[in-house]
Image (cartoon, rainbow, N blue to C red):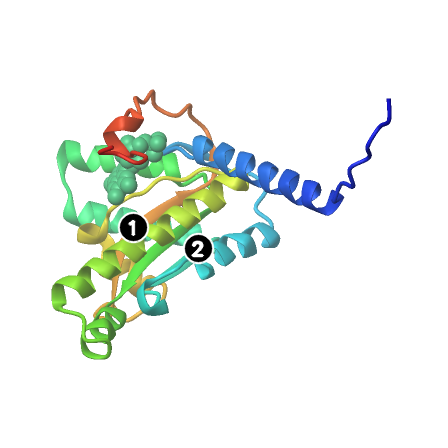
Amino acid sequence: MTRVAFPVDTSVVFEAERAGRAAVALQAVLAERRSIRRLRSGVFTPEMRQRLLEAVRLTPAAYNLPPWRVVLVHERREALWAEVEEGFREALHGEQLERYLDRLRGFAPGVAVALVFADNGVERELREGKGASAEVAASFVQQALGMVQFALWLAVTAEGLATSLQHWDHLVGPRLARFVGLPETEFRLAATMPIGYADEEPRGIDRAVAEQVCAVDPGE
Ligand SMILES: Cc1cc2nc3c(=O)[nH]c(=O)nc-3n(C[C@H](O)[C@H](O)[C@H](O)COP(=O)(O)O)c2cc1C
């Protein structure tokens, strides 16, 4: 029997394998990302910091106008936590204050804190420069803020680190803007992401079933 040899373009095979590996790796990061609220310290190199900032820089935004300013606090994190505590003590009392302080004790041993501020100037530019209605401009800003938080969360997870989303604008927003040298009238604290190594198991969670949240070719 004669054997027919088919030429194989190995570069195509390698490319498909590479793409497959990247897809599997991304799935793993997506599955690993969880909210972790008890942190411990550990390695946090300049290269790791740079990759986190790169995730922020590569995040898309409407009209390519990023409405965020992400400030990573590493060296000054102890002073930052003291500032947050002072703000909590000023605004909260009793049992609620104790719960918030307990949260802080879980975050403080971590390696860094990412403060995600919304840049009011960009929302203005969307309205005045791009002609977006107030409602659309506000929506675009919110959607882009969600994107950057998720990009950063995945990048943190890919480094073997953990984080969570905390919403403290009403308690310490202006105070933290001043702490990092941003004008508090122009920058609103959208989220605080304490970063560190996980010092707790993630909570048990039931994810939505696929049919509830996504579909392929429905209505046929
Ligand atoms: C928009 C948004 C707001 C959230 N706000 C908070 C928050 O203020 N504090 C907190 O501890 N977790 C917060 N979370 C975390 C969610 O509770 C959590 O992501 C969800 O329960 C799924 O759990 P997982 O992150 O471990 O997968 C928030 C998440 C999102 C997406």
Q: Residue furthest front?
A: 1
The residue drawn where x is 24% and y is 37% is: 100
When the figure is inspected, residue 176 is found, relative to residue 9, above or below; the finding is below
The residue drawn where x is 22% and y is 34% is: 219
Which quadrant is home to the N terminus?
Answer: top right
Q: Amino acid at mark 2?
A: Val
Q: Earlier in the sequence, mark 2 or mark 1?
A: 2
Q: In this orientation, does residue 101 appear?
A: no
Q: Amino acid at mark 1?
A: Ala
Q: Nearer the viewer, residue 43 or 125?
A: 125
Between the C-alphas of marks 2 and 1, the distance is 14 Å
Q: In this orientation, does residue 39 appear?
A: yes
Q: Which residue position holds label 1?
A: 191
**How far across and down, in percent of the image, does residue 110 sit?**
46, 40
The residue drawn where x is 20% and y is 58% is: 139
Residue 20 sits in which quadrant? top right
Q: Nearer the viewer, residue 151 or 216?
A: 216
When the figure is inspected, residue 29 is found, relative to residue 112, above or below; the finding is above
Q: Secondary structure at mark 2?
A: strand
